């Protein structure tokens, strides 16, 4: 590189930045979830409730969907697409019968949250995630980012099947 | 009353207060839920999440349990009995399949929150509700208090069957 002119060095630097850009926009960071580079948002367990759901089948979880202030405001106001900065958190737990509750009620009717399975996030950033509808996705187990590109690469194609009018979000606000 | 002495009037007033006391301690207030006089807490929909559950059978709802700051802190710290001022909110919605989600997933697996059914509150006040384990109970439909004494009188006997070590609360905090 010693023989390169200052102009050539600048040109080389630009080429290097461009070449590395996908890795930076994605995740080369061990603290971030794969593909989208989403980090665990601080304080997400304190966020407000958007809705709840039960996914049967192989997932067999019960879940709560929480949102940061930007996301919750957009849900309540019906603002679509969601503004940049919106983050939706999906917390999930094993779907387990409550023997204790059922004994009180006198019948098997009560299903509650067991051990946590994982937490997923949808992060709105229309520039950074322009190629996936403006959304980046992350998954965490026990606070640790999931580093599987194969897994994280399933997020966007699935959400792309949610209505565009809903900004590719499955959850509706529960009033 | 014109012929009564001042002393007699005071005595009469005391008698009236005593006679009315159960109604005051309970609910003679159209804005309050029956029996315990619980009013709809302002801003409860913004409270933090304690857990989620599905009650099958005749209820057939999916629910979120939220708490005010006092309640959530006690849940997280394991403080029992709950301090006075703790309020636990149980929001419930019809448990409905999501045709939209199931179409995306390719199988019937997704159950979501439909129309709201009712909202119930457990209010800790060890003095006011000393006779029911320190808890008063309320139920609201569409923001309106349920005025059925028969209904509200079922709350305490059922919660009395929850463990005393849990301060008669069924819900566990979902971590």
Image (cartoon, coloured by chain):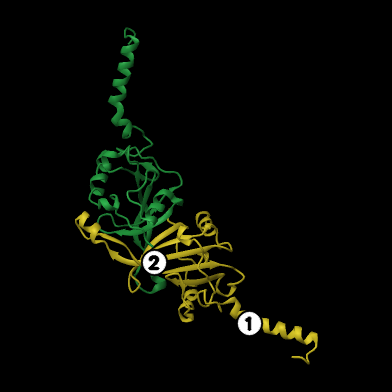
Chain colours: A yellow, B green
The residue nearer to you, when weighing B2 against A134, is B2
The residue nearer to you, when weighing A5 against A175, is A5
> In the image, is residue A26 above or below residue A125?
below
Q: Residue furthest left?
A: A106
The residue nearer to you, when weighing B48 against B98, is B48
Q: Residues within 10 Å of mark 1 (few under 14, many from 20)?
A: few
The residue nearer to you, when weighing B123 against B101, is B123
Marked residue chain, label 1: A
> In the image, is residue B144 above or below residue A161?
above
Residue A12 in the figure: left or right of residue B149: right
Give the distance between the C-alpha atoms of the residues marked 2 and 1, in whole angstroms. Answer: 35 Å
What percent of the width, then of the height, locates residue A28?
56, 79
What percent of the width, then of the height, locates residue A86?
54, 62
Report the residue marked by disc 1: A20
> In the image, is residue B164 above or below residue B18?
below
Whether discs 2 and 1 lie on one chain: the answer is: yes
Quadrant of the rendered image containing residue A22: bottom right
The residue drawn where x is 33% and y is 31% is: B24
Image quadrant where one finds the C terminus of chain B: bottom left
Report the residue marked by disc 2: A92
What percent of the width, then of the height, locates residue A77?
53, 54
């Amino acid at each position: 590189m010693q023989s390169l002119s200052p102009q050539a060095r600048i040109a080389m630097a630009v080429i290097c930045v461009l070449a590395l850009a996908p890795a930076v926009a994605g995740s080369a960071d061990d603290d971030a979830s794969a593909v989208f580079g989403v980090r665990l948002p601080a304080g997400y367990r304190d966020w407000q409730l958007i809705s709840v759901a039960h996914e049967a089948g192989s997932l067999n979880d019960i879940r709560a969907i929480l949102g940061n202030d930007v996301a919750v405001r957009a849900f309540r106001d019906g603002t679509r697409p969601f503004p940049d900065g919106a983050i939706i958190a999906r917390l999930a737990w094993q779907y387990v019968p409550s023997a204790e509750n059922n004994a009180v009620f006198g019948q098997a009717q009560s299903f509650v949250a067991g051990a946590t399975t994982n937490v997923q996030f949808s992060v709105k950033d229309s520039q950074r995630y322009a190629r996936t509808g403006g959304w980046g996705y992350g998954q965490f187990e026990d606070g640790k980012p999931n580093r599987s590109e194969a897994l994280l690469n399933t997020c966007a194609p699935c959400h792309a099947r949610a209505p565009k009018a809903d900004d590719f979000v499955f959850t509706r606000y529960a009033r």
